[in-house]
Amino acid sequence: MVKMDGSVETVLWVILLLQASAADATWWYISQVSLSHYGNSIRSNRRPLHPLVICGDIPGLIGRQRKLCRNNPNVMLSLREGALIGINECQWQFRHSKWNCSTLEKDSSVFGKLMLKVGSQEAAFVYAIQSAGAVYGITKACSTGQLPQCACDDTKRPPSKSRDRKGIFTWGGCSDNVKFGIDFTKRFVDSKEKITRDGRALMNLHNNRAGRKAVQKSMKLECKCHGVSGACTIRTCWYTMKPFRDVGNYLRQKYNGAIQVMVNQAGTKLIVAQRTFKKATRRDMVYFESSPNYCIYDPTTGSLGTAGRECNRTSKGTNGCELMCCGRGYNTVNVRKVFKCECKFQWCCFVNCQWCEKRVDIHTCNGPNPTKPPHSMFHRNRYFRQTS
């Protein structure tokens, strides 16, 4: 038996821990990389971001991903913004569900190991919305001139013309270069799945593509009219992406209609699990397994449970106390709520409001065990911002 001194043993343990972390890591971790130590002008030519800095902060990247990262540091910053967009939208879409798309701080899997281990509908949505967010973030950066690698879509330039239901128009403005966003996202995000090629990798690749397709589908034509008295005798048009909320709503519909699949005998493609189901298209989400029990806090799987979650006592939907609390009951606290009221416009030019208050009941779900910590202690919904 070979004896090792303490320093060698410590190094080996560190290596093993890093390997374990990388095994559970995803590119989504870029959303948790802090940019504070990179400086405030990381996109400027005056202080270029060193590619090794941000690439070294993302665990679990394979060689191809690290190469793309090193060669395109500014695109990676846009990818980070896209990952945050995806997380925020995921948490909005599932804010009233038992699984509310929470993230785990300083966890390389970001959404918890449950998303990596269980091929559920929720995992399908996470892969799709994060892929869509990546495309969206990169495409927006192209259109706003933040990336030297791309700009507006050069295939939609004057004096080229096209036709829609209203007649002929001239291409102009700045059409969103969604093609660049899709191409880079596909190369970077899909790389890890393509070297694995097992059933779960095929599922992830399918849902990644569904996310990219959702952004592509969100493109809309915007036009500006030119002519006497505003008449649309001449129109200049361009393509732009709809707000990401539209992409999220579309993908939520696809989540609701996700198709259960299995791998064929050759292990080369996905087929529907039940013959009576329709074949999954490129825009559909697919999953392997039924959703786990999200009622109970289980750190081994990443399930945060519903203890401490706020619920609606009168609702019969997923946000109702009966469903949200999984039959464990709920606590009610009466609190004072202060809000602006009786707002009036004053000339000129501000809105003058009064402060009003009222008493409201807040209902929160009981936990399965009174000794468990309250939900707020382990619940991480870091990026969620309620928007209209």
Image: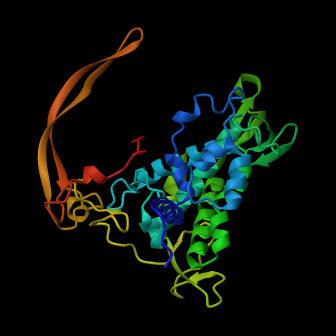
The image position of residue 303, as x and y in percent, is 34, 64
Image vertical order of residue 250 relative to residue 336, above or below = below
Residue at x 28% of width, y 57% of height = 319
Q: Quadrant of residue 352?
A: top left
Q: Residue at x 87, y 42 (%)?
A: 160
Q: How many marks?
A: 0
Location of residue 170 with respect to 315 vertically, above or below? above
Image location (x, y in percent) of residue 26: 54, 60
Q: In the displayed structure, does residue 58 sit left or right of residue 317?
A: right
Determine the image quadrant of residue 213: bottom right
Quadrant that contains the C terminus: top left
> Is 41 rendered above or below residue 165?
above
Seen at 40% across and 45% down, the residue is 382
Q: Is residue 221 visible?
A: no
Seen in the image, is 245 located left or right of residue 357?
right
From the viewer's side, name the closer residue of 152 and 19.
Answer: 19
Q: Nearer the viewer, residue 386 or 188?
A: 188
In the image, 3 versus 294, the foreground residue is 3
User: Which residue is most to the right?
Assistant: 159
Q: Is residue 385 left or right of residue 378?
A: right
| x then y, percent, for residue 321 | 21, 59
From this viewpoint, is residue 170 visible? yes
Q: Which residue appears at 65% of the width and 89% of the height?
A: 266
Q: Residue furthest top?
A: 348
**Residue 70: horizontal and vertical position, in percent?**
70, 48
Is 294 situated left or right of 223 in this image? Answer: left
Instruction: Give the image quarter of residue 154.
Output: top right
